[in-house]
Amino acid sequence: GEDVEQSLFLSVREGDSSVINCTYTDSSSTYLYWYKQEPGAGLQLLTYIFSNMDMKQDQRLTVLLNKKDKHLSLRIADTQTGDSAIYFCADNNNDMRFGAGTRLTVKP
Amino acid sequence: DADVTQTPRNRITKTGKRIMLECSQTKGHDRMYWYRQDPGLGLRLIYYSFDVKDINKGEISDGYSVSRQAQAKFSLSLESAIPNQTALYFCATLDRLGTEAFFGQGTRLTVV
């Protein structure tokens, strides 16, 4: 099947920017998503980007999409301790497939 | 009511037993999904459904079955549970546009 891959860990200091990266293989995906999972909770849809867009900004979140390289990134500006969580990218053709998740740790 | 409700939240069962996990939603979304989450493996898709008459296998459907009883209800069954089905299971919904998604709180299943 098609794969979505992302690195497993990222550690940043409070106030810095975080960049979480993802690569995907299914070029026919209409949307690409970023989800956040806090401990003991289900996943929360943070943002999505339509496949014909290059960038989407939503407050502290910036999503960049490079269709040629099939690379998606999520930048979190001014990262706070409350941003500590696991972040998943996902694509959506007919099914919705997820990467393994990146555990973001924010140090004070 | 929560947007997506999963029952039970926790379950311990014995090897060989049949178990059903239930999911109901209040969002009116057509698309529903079942995933399992294992440490370091992310979420893996078990089954998905686009409407009541539509059922599709995901990456890891072996050992599982599903039923879409109504638009709002999508249940996952393990006909004969085995220990490697111990995991956290999530139900999710997605609207037709693909821009609104909700997850349940998860069901932690332990097979002993």
Image (spheres, coloured by chain):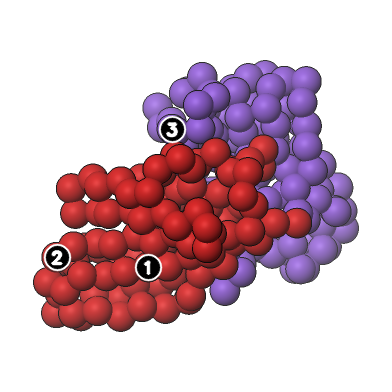
Chain colours: A red, B purple
Secondary element at image label 1: strand
Q: Which mark is residue A20?
A: 1
Q: Which mark is residue B100?
A: 3
Q: Residue A38: in sight, yes or no? A: no
Q: Where residue B13 sits: x, y (%)?
A: 73, 58
In front: label 1 or label 3: 1
* Residue A86, picture quadrant: bottom left
- The residue shown at (40%, 43%) is A53
| Amino acid type shown at disc 2 | Asp
Q: Nearer the viewer, residue A108 or B86?
A: A108
Please tell me which of labels 2 and 1 falls first in the chain: 1
Q: Are marks 2 and 1 on the same chain?
A: yes
Left or right: B41 as drawn, with respect to A69? right
Q: Which mark is residue A9?
A: none
Q: Chain of mark 3?
A: B
* Residue B44, picture quadrant: bottom right
Q: Chain of mark 2?
A: A
Q: Where residue B109 sits: x, y (%)?
A: 64, 58
Check disc 2: other Cα within 10 Å, few if <14, some if 14-19, many if 20+: some
- The residue shown at (69%, 64%) is B86
| Amino acid type shown at disc 1 | Ile
Left or right: A30 as drawn, with respect to A94? left
Pointers 1 and 3 in contact (CB under 8 A)? no
Q: Nearer the viewer, residue B88 or A56?
A: A56
Check disc 3: other Cα within 10 Å, few if <14, some if 14-19, many if 20+: some
Q: Is residue A88 above or below residue B58?
A: below
Q: In 3D space, how far apart are the residues under numbered discs 1 and 3 (Cα atoms)?
A: 22 Å
Q: Which mark is residue A78?
A: 2
Check disc 1: other Cα within 10 Å, few if <14, some if 14-19, many if 20+: many
| Amino acid type shown at disc 3 | Glu
Q: In 3D space, how far apart are the residues under numbered discs 2 and 1 (Cα atoms)?
A: 14 Å
Q: Where residue A11 sits: x, y (%)?
A: 30, 80
